Image (cartoon, rainbow, N blue to C red):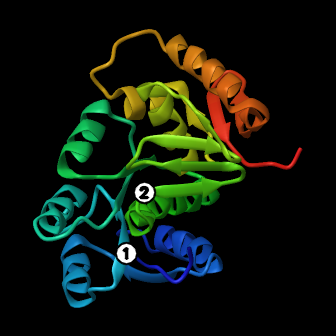
Amino acid sequence: MGNCKILVIDDESRMRKLVRDFLSKKGYDVLEASNGEEAMDIFYSDKEIGLLILDVMMPKMDGWEVCREVRKTSKVPIIMLTAKADERDELLGFELGVDEYVTKPFSPKILVARVEAILRRSNMGNNDGIITVGDIRMDKNAHEVFVGDKPIELSFKEFELLAYFIENQGIALSRERILNNVWNYDYFGDARTIDTHVKKLRNKMGEQGKYIKTIWGMGYKFEVTNE
């Protein structure tokens, strides 16, 4: 997944360096901008940029303005960095086409995991929607899942849930975040519905159900192991 060119936009040089160092260790080519205007100049001049990490609060041109400008011409993935967890801000970001939200302070390792998950999702169109992980093969276009050579029958939400787990493998996912992404923001049901779906999904996956790990008091994490 390395060699992708990533533009990091933040007015704090220390923050840019922190993010750049961790991404560079993973093989990513990192560009930097200290404000929105500089970011747009770089973005328009370099057509190989594959992802933006964008701070909300910046001088000259803030993150919202940058996002609006980018979305006029490009669907490049955008991760928004914000100093506050405000639902209204998050909703505005998603309306503008933000792919992921990360609240400061954050773990650089988690940010890298989010970057890798987004790039996996954005690259899925290159292989006709077929995802292979461990002993699981998922065909998103045909809406089919195989464990080994055996097809398994999943409901629509079970399929969507498994796809979300696979696309975010290695990332700890809270129940709230799963609800927001799989059931969408307009769902006001009980978060325990996730536990019910996970239980059914694990049963249908058989031995591979162990890939879905419970994080007590929080949610779940999809991780392929040989245990």
Question: Dot 2: what SS?
Answer: loop
Q: Residue at left 52%, top 28%?
A: 154
Residue 202 percent location from the top left of the image: 68, 27
Other residues around mark 2 within 10 Å, as few (<14) / some (14–19) / many (≥20) = some
The CA span between labels 1 and 2 is 19 Å
Residue 60 percent location from the top left of the image: 16, 69
User: Which numbered disc, 1 or 2, marks the residue that appears first in the sequence?
Assistant: 1
**Mark in the foreground, 1 or 2:** 2
Tell which residue pokes out farthest to the bottom in this image.
45
Tell which residue pokes out farthest to the right in this image.
227
* 223 displayed left or right of 225: left
* 173 displayed left or right of 203: left
Q: Which residue is mark 2?
A: 129
Q: Which mark is residue 50?
A: 1
3 up-or-down from 102: above or below: below
* 164 displayed left or right of 210: left
